[in-house]
Image: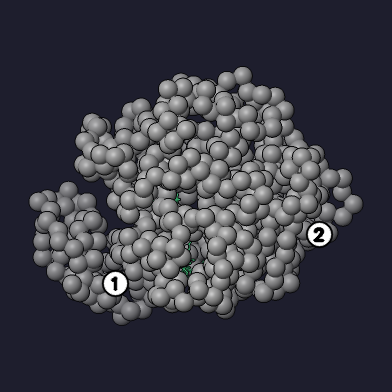
């Protein structure tokens, strides 16, 4: 069957399609049907089945006689170490860790926050939670204590599992003080913390609260997998929205297993036993789906890579890892390739390694610019497949179904909708647009298995963010178009979310931080174009009347404030003091116009602008920051 036939087979019988895919999963009790319509636009998949994620990702491969296969390769150019863990070893390690967590009182439904760098123990912690039916929430290491505290207060974890430190090139990230700071800041307090002591930095343990990762596993009874309902949350992952309060995306167990397993062959075109590598971080959705769960559920070998595309030690790292571990499919973000391209424009490093094992390269997380795609194609000689998805969906909305049929690539397009997604382009009023016309991208409900059923503790916000604008549809927050051949093009966000080096960030969240500076009366944060990171945040602050301090002093404090409150990952380094912000007569800040000026793009003077002269002042400020030069 080709792509069209598979897509049509889903469209003509969505439930039959997914029930058939569910056959590839081990169930303690098979679901009686696929889709459960909860009414009022809420849906669940495989809700009455009973299964366990860890069983499907680990134990079943051991039972099937593949225990000797490597499950996880930890390749860490930062520490200069390489470590392989077989499926049997993984089962034993995870069962013991789960046993220790159970002995400390962790049960099905309890939340556990995981705050760890790119070490196999991060995956083991996720899997141990899954084994017990506990709901994990992994927090990215580049966030500051305050962001961790916000997540602690929302998820209310019984336990936190953290490492003593993370390692960035030339810098040790002291996780433990960040964790202690976050617990101090949070209203909710966990019962206990498990600390994985890395040899690069041993952290002080808090008496009565913290236990040592190895020590607390001593003498415990390994835990068996606890069967959970198909609609039991496997995890909650927080992502940026329009405001500073992150959204807790819920992933239900059954749909997650079925959908991710389907993607491994049909999208990534790997077979069980093949090595698959997603060079992301476990703190992001790509890391959840494609470093941890999907490759393991499908019986692949996954790579946990602790390094950067460049500088660890050079721009050849990707090719070294691919060749050394015989990677068959590789997934990264365009920004990573832009970094490699900057250091090695001619692809000299690629020539040093045999990457004949590699079938294709997949890009996601941000718009893949044609220059980067063409460069990657040229230097590697491999197909480069852009694919589009979101934390909310957990897997590809539109991509190349390479395991079904390698369709022609159209550079600039992440290709075609996957089965499960009925993608539509709508105008502001919700009317369908014609091929080639730009509009909001929406997906007809229900969304497929594996996507978010709602937000953690926030059903109203779920409705408001995704369902209310276009009744009967999921609003993606992206704008774009579909061409005559059914290929999708993603052009921009329709909200205040920006994408910095493949990391999703909220400008609204940064504005909240800047507004809290005692000398700031008003502020705006916009996302300007950056050659390496795609976008960079830039702040404009107006000072409170009477404040008469050197502007440089204030902007420095603003930069520090965002780093301290949100974290280094925000990459907030551009900030200017201005007298006024450009606004409409009704007081709405004209952020989109500011972005256009910064990027030296043509723009139409907004008819509703209050005082056009302010734009000249903004232009001067932008030029001071190295923008608006064209
Ligand atoms: N823990 C702690 N700090 C982190 C971190 C982590 N896990 N990840 C990033 N940071 C810090 C960095 O050290 C940097 O700090 P600095 O301001 O002190 O230099 C800051 O956050 C910004 O990091 P980043 O945006 O990653 O920039 P960079 O200059 O260090 O690296 C790239 C640029 C392009 C090489 C890098 O962003 C990259 O590899 N991107 C790929 C992104 C990706 O895979 N995204 C996943 C979505 S698919
Ligand atoms: P995240 O939830 O962090 O994965 O970010 C999702 C957002 O990143 C999407 O809504 C898009 O705005 C953007 N994005 C992800 N993949 C792509 C892609 N292939 N092309 C364009 N934008 C993308």
**Callout 2 secondary element:** loop
Nearer the observer, 332 or 384: 384
Tell me if label 1 and label 2 are in contact, CB under 8 Å.
no
- Residue 218 image label: none
- Give the number of marks: 2
Q: Does label 2 point to a residue whose CB lies under 8 Å from ligand 1?
A: no
Q: Position of residue 407 (x, y in %)?
A: 39, 45
Nearer the observer, 159 or 481: 481
Q: Quadrant of residue 282?
A: bottom right
Residue drawn 62% across and 72% down?
77
With respect to residue 478, does 3 lie above or below?
Answer: above
Q: Quadrant of residue 34?
A: top right
Task: Tell me the CA gap for discs 1 and 2.
Answer: 49 Å
Q: Position of residue 486 (x, y in %)?
A: 31, 39
Residue of label 1: 576
Residue of label 2: 214
Label 2 neighbourhood size at 10 Å, few (<14), some (14-19), many (20+)?
some
**Is 327 situated left or right of 549 in this image?**
right
Q: Position of residue 189 (x, y in %)?
A: 65, 51
Q: Nearer the viewer, mark 1 or mark 2?
A: 2
**Is 85 situated left or right of 517 in this image?**
right
With respect to residue 615, does 443 lie above or below?
Answer: above
**Callout 1 secondary element:** strand
Q: Is residue 36 visible?
A: yes
Residue drawn 79% across and 40% down?
63
Mark 1 or 2, nearer chain start:
2
């Amino acid at each position: 069957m080709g792509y069209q036939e598979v897509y049509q087979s889903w469209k003509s019988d969505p439930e039959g399609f997914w029930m058939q895919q569910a056959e590839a999963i081990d169930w303690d009790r098979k679901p009686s049907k696929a889709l459960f319509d909860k009414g009022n636009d809420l849906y669940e998949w495989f809700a009455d089945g009973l299964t366990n994620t860890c069983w499907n990702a680990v134990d079943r491969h051991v039972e099937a006689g593949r225990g000797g296969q490597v499950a996880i390769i930890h390749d860490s150019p930062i520490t200069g170490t390489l470590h392989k863990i077989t499926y049997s070893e993984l089962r034993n390690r995870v069962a013991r860790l789960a046993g220790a967590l159970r002995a400390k009182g962790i049960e099905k439904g309890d939340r556990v926050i995981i705050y760890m760098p790119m070490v196999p123990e991060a995956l083991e912690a996720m899997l141990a939670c899954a084994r017990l039916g506990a709901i994990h929430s992994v927090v990215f290491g580049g966030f500051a204590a305050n962001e961790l505290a916000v997540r602690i207060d929302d998820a209310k974890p019984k336990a936190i599992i953290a490492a003593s430190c993370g390692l960035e090139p030339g810098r040790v990230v002291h996780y433990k003080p960040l964790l202690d700071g976050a617990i101090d800041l949070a209203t909710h307090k966990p019962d206990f913390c498990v600390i994985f002591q890395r040899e690069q930095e041993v952290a002080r343990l808090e008496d009565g609260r913290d236990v040592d990762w190895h020590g607390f596993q001593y003498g415990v009874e390994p835990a068996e997998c606890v069967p959970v309902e198909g609609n039991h949350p496997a995890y909650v992952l927080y992502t940026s929205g329009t405001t500073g309060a992150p959204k807790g995306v819920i992933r239900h167990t059954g749909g997650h297993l079925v959908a991710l397993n389907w993607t491994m062959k049909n999208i990534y075109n790997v077979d069980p036993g093949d090595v698959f590598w997603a060079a992301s971080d476990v703190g992001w959705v790509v890391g959840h789906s494609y470093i941890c769960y999907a490759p393991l559920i499908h019986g692949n070998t996954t790579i946990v890579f602790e390094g950067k595309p460049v500088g660890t030690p050079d721009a050849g790292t990707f090719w070294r890892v691919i060749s050394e571990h015989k990677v068959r499919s590789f997934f990264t973000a365009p920004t990573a390739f832009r970094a490699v391209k900057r250091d090695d424009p001619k692809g000299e490093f690629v020539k040093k390694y045999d990457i004949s094992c590699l079938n294709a390269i997949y890009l996601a997380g941000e718009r893949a610019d044609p220059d980067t795609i063409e460069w990657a194609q040229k230097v590697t000689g491999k197909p480069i497949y852009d694919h589009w998805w979101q934390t909310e969906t957990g897997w590809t909305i539109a991509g190349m179904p390479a395991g079904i049929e390698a369709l022609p690539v159209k550079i600039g397009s992440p290709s075609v909708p996957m089965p499960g997604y009925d993608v539509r382009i709508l105008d502001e009023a919700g009317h369908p647009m014609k091929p080639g016309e730009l509009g909001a991208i929406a997906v007809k409900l229900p969304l497929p298995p594996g996507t978010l059923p709602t937000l953690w503790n926030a059903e109203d916000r779920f409705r408001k963010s995704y369902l209310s604008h276009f009744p009967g549809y999921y609003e993606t927050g992206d704008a774009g178009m579909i061409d005559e051949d059914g290929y999708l093009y993603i052009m921009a966000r329709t909200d205040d979310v920006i994408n910095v080096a493949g990391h999703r960030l909220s400008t609204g969240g940064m504005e909240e931080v800047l507004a809290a500076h005692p000398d700031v009366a008003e502020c705006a944060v916009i996302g300007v174009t950056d050659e390496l990171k795609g976008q960079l945040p830039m702040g404009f602050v107006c000072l409170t009347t009477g404040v008469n301090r050197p502007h440089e002093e204030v902007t420095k404090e603003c930069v520090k404030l965002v780093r301290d409150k949100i974290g280094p990952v925000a990459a907030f380094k551009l900030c200017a003091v201005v007298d006024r912000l450009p606004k409409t007569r009704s007081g709405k800040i004209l952020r989109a116009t500011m972005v256009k000026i910064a990027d030296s793009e043509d723009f139409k003077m907004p008819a509703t602008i209050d005082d056009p002269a302010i734009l000249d002042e903004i232009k001067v400020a932008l030029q001071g920051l190295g923008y608006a030069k064209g």
